[in-house]
């Protein structure tokens, strides 16, 4: 497969267009595979060229350094599609399938279990990796297995299935965050036999609640910090008067304190500095260290989290 000649493999592409924060420098190499054959060819190419390989989906929960990323960046947002069985509740979806799209489709089929996901700005693959959740629900409750490709040395490109018990799920955490596997497909078990109208109304209500309480009009990554249960990160930040705090065009949202928004020309460095400012302030006054949900790519090792 002629990867460069076909236009599948591109060089020096700005990653700001591939993240929901709209920041990030260029990828040395970028590809957006839309099928298995392309994905296999790209992984083989990176291995032959001895290049590091990083995977992104919808680009939410990602902060990419202003200098960009070396090696190959694989964006899986074109790897879409899903299969739903309304009788059994079994649902399978490709990694790039938007999780809100899957949630709405499941609701229309009378399948209960993903209504919380309608406002999540991510993909099936990203939801599995981060154990995404909202409004009392999370991915781990319904995900039964993932199909993955190995990204490790001699086994790079090998396919295997990881079952639920293999994934070490915890709050906003899974084993998949270690970077050794690339999720290509997720398998869910939902509850069949529910009223599609009621489920659709519930998903619409959940979306309305999120859009009414969160700053969807500005580029952001979604929630920046994990909640230090049983406390809420946003309330801790708001209590310290940090709503509206800015570094350059990076701002703690005046609408929801656990969001950092890009007012137009923010840089990854400004966002990173604002994250650290919030963490330092909360630790100083509350004695609590806030852990980001955000994954940083391209930052030097040892960058504070």
Image: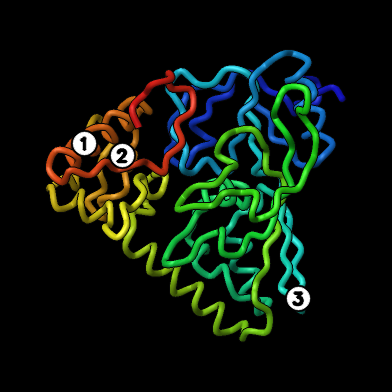
Percent across and percent down for residue 37 are 84, 36
Examine the rendered structure and indicate whether residue 289 appears above or below residue 254: above
Q: Can the viewer see residue 143? A: yes
The front one of 88 and 244 is 88
Real-space Cα separation, disc 3 to disc 2, in angstroms: 46 Å
Instruction: Name the residue tied to disc 1.
Output: 246
Q: Residue furthest top?
A: 49
C-beta proximity under 8 Å, tags 2 and 1: yes
Q: Can the viewer see residue 266? A: no
Real-space Cα separation, disc 3 to disc 1, in angstroms: 50 Å
C-beta proximity under 8 Å, tags 3 and 1: no
Real-space Cα separation, disc 2 to disc 1, in angstroms: 10 Å
Report which quarter residue 284 is drawn in.
top left
For the N terminus, which image quadrant?
Answer: top right
Query: At x 68% / y 68%, what residue is drawn?
Result: 189
| Number of marks in the rendered image | 3
The front one of 194 and 78 is 194
Instruction: Name the residue tied to disc 3.
Output: 88
Report which quarter residue 73 is drawn in.
top right
Instruction: Name the residue tied to disc 2.
Output: 263
Report which quarter residue 182 is drawn in.
top right
The front one of 177 and 197 is 177
Q: Dot 2: what SS?
A: loop
């Amino acid at each position: 497969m002629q990867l460069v000649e076909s236009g599948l493999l591109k060089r020096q592409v700005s990653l700001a267009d591939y993240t929901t924060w709209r920041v990030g420098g260029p990828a040395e190499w970028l590809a957006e595979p839309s099928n298995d054959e392309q994905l296999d060819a790209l992984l083989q190419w990176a291995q032959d060229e001895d290049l590091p390989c990083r995977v992104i989906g919808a680009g939410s929960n990602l902060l990419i350094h202003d200098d960009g990323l070396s090696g190959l960046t694989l964006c899986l947002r074109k790897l879409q599609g899903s299969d739903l069985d309304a009788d059994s509740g079994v649902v399978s979806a490709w990694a790039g399938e938007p999780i809100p799209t899957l949630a709405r489709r499941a609701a229309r089929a009378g399948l209960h279990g993903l209504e919380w996901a309608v406002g999540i700005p991510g993909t099936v693959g990203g939801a599995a990796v981060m154990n995404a959740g909202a409004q009392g629900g999370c991915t781990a409750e319904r995900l039964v297995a993932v199909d993955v490709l190995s990204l490790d040395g001699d086994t790079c490109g090998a396919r295997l299935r990881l079952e639920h018990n293999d994934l070490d799920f915890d709050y906003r955490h899974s084993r998949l965050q270690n970077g050794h596997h690339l999720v290509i497909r997720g398998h869910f078990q939902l509850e069949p036999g529910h009223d599609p109208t009621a489920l659709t109304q519930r998903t619409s209500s959940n979306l309305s609640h999120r859009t009414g309480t969160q700053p969807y009009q500005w580029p952001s990554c979604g929630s920046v910090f994990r909640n230090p249960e049983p406390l809420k990160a946003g309330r801790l930040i708001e209590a310290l008067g940090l709503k509206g705090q800015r570094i350059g065009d990076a701002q703690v949202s005046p609408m929801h304190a656990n969001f950092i928004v890009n007012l137009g020309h923010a840089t990854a460095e400004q966002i990173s500095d604002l994250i650290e400012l919030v963490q330092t302030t909360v630790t100083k006054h509350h004695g609590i260290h806030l852990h980001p949900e955000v994954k940083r790519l391209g930052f030097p090792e040892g960058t504070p989290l």
